[in-house]
Image (cartoon, rainbow, N blue to C red):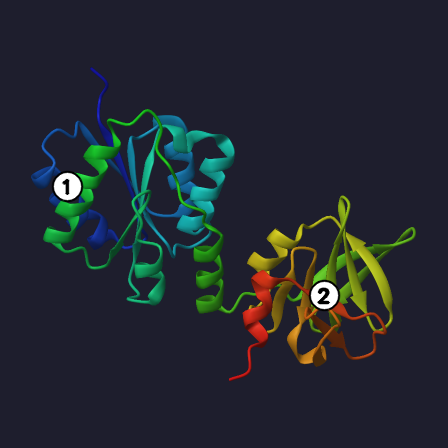
């Protein structure tokens, strides 16, 4: 029979100890509870030990819990491990992301709530493959809390590399394998996808308006309906307006 191993990753020693004691009391089938004090240590242990369950603090020095989870997804290791996120902040994200695939728990950990998480994990262990929720929205929430949005971009124009301030960008436009960065001074190319940019850009300053375009909100001059009833965003300094897809039209609904 496979040994049941659980990993706790949190930078607070007392929380690690408290959670370890609770897990050993409430989940007697556990064979081994391991602990990590930071994200790098958690990632290394998860790769080498392959625990069936991992309790990850969202905010840790170095790698965050989300970054650890993303790396485990890239490594294909989330097929062997179920992830429960820990957070000290009772924010909308806790409710918004508390879905069947991944659990989220507030710190300090409540015994009754942990019991629910254990029940959920036990049910998951009988499934062939764990399912890990999309981490993009949660990553953006953590970035908002930390205020560490993308500030500078290294972009190519011909043979030259330009360091561009994000606040000077008017539009990010997806084209083939590249993304075009449009500023008042010209156009440049980067390899980041719009999906990656959405995770790194301040959502209050940049809006996705189409599957192929992100615009800087302060640069919007007006939004106008065309002859077919569709919306088009006019950007200051640009002649060509950007189409707005139905999916994002609610952004411009009159209040």
Percent position of residue 181, x then y: 77, 61
Could you tell which of marks 2 and 1 lies nearer the N-terminus? Answer: 1
Residue 39, can we see it?
yes
- Front position among marks 2 and 1: 2
Name above or below for residue 88 compared with residue 19. Answer: below
Q: Name the foreground residue: 85 vs 130.
A: 130
The single residue placed furthest to the front in the displayed view is 228
Element type where label 2 sits in the image: strand
How many dots with numbers?
A: 2
Q: Is residue 43 left or right of residue 156?
A: left
* Quarter of the picture holding the N terminus: top left
Toward which corner of the image does residue 97 lie, by quadrant? bottom left
The single residue placed furthest to the right in the displayed view is 158
**Which residue: 9% across, 32% down?**
28
Percent position of residue 224, x then y: 71, 78
Q: Which residue is mark 1?
A: 23
Residue 204, can we see it?
no
**Which residue: 59% across, 69% down?**
249
Percent position of residue 232, x then y: 72, 71
Element type where label 1 sits in the image: helix
Asked if the residues shown at circle 2 and circle 1 are in contact, with their CB atoms under 8 angstroms apart, the answer is no
- Residue 226, label in figure: none
Q: Which residue is mark 2?
A: 243
Name above or below for residue 76 compared with residue 162. Answer: above
**Which residue: 61% across, 68% down?**
207
Q: Is residue 113 left or right of residue 74?
A: left
Percent position of residue 180, x then y: 79, 57
Q: Is residue 211 left or right of residue 112?
A: right
Name above or below for residue 23 compared with residue 80. Answer: below
Name above or below for residue 158 compared with residue 118. Answer: below
């Amino acid at each position: 029979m496979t040994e049941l191993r659980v990993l706790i990753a949190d930078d607070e020693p007392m929380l690690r100890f408290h959670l370890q004691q609770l897990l050993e009391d409430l989940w007697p089938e556990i064979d081994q509870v391991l602990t990590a004090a930071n994200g790098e240590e958690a990632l290394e242990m998860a790769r080498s030990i392959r625990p069936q369950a991992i309790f990850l603090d969202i905010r840790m020095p170095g790698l965050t819990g989300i970054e650890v989870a993303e790396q485990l997804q890239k490594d294909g290791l989330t097929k062997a491990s179920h992830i429960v996120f820990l957070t000290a902040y009772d924010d909308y994200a806790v409710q918004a992301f508390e879905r069947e695939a991944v659990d989220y728990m507030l710190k300090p950990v409540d015994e009754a709530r942990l019991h629910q998480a254990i029940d959920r994990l036990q049910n998951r262990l009988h499934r062939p493959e764990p399912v890990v929720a999309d981490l993009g929205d949660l990553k953006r929430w953590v970035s908002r809390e930390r205020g560490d949005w993308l500030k500078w971009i290294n972009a190519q124009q011909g043979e030259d590399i330009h360091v561009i301030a994000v606040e000077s960008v008017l539009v990010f436009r997806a084209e083939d394998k590249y993304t075009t960065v449009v500023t008042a001074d010209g156009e440049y190319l980067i390899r980041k996808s719009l999906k990656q940019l959405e995770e790194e850009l301040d959502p209050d300053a940049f809006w996705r308006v189409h599957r192929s375009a992100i615009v800087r909100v302060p640069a919007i001059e007006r939004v106008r309906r065309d002859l077919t009833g569709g919306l088009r965003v006019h950007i200051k300094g640009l002649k060509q307006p950007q189409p707005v897809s139905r999916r994002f039209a609610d952004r411009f609904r009159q209040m």
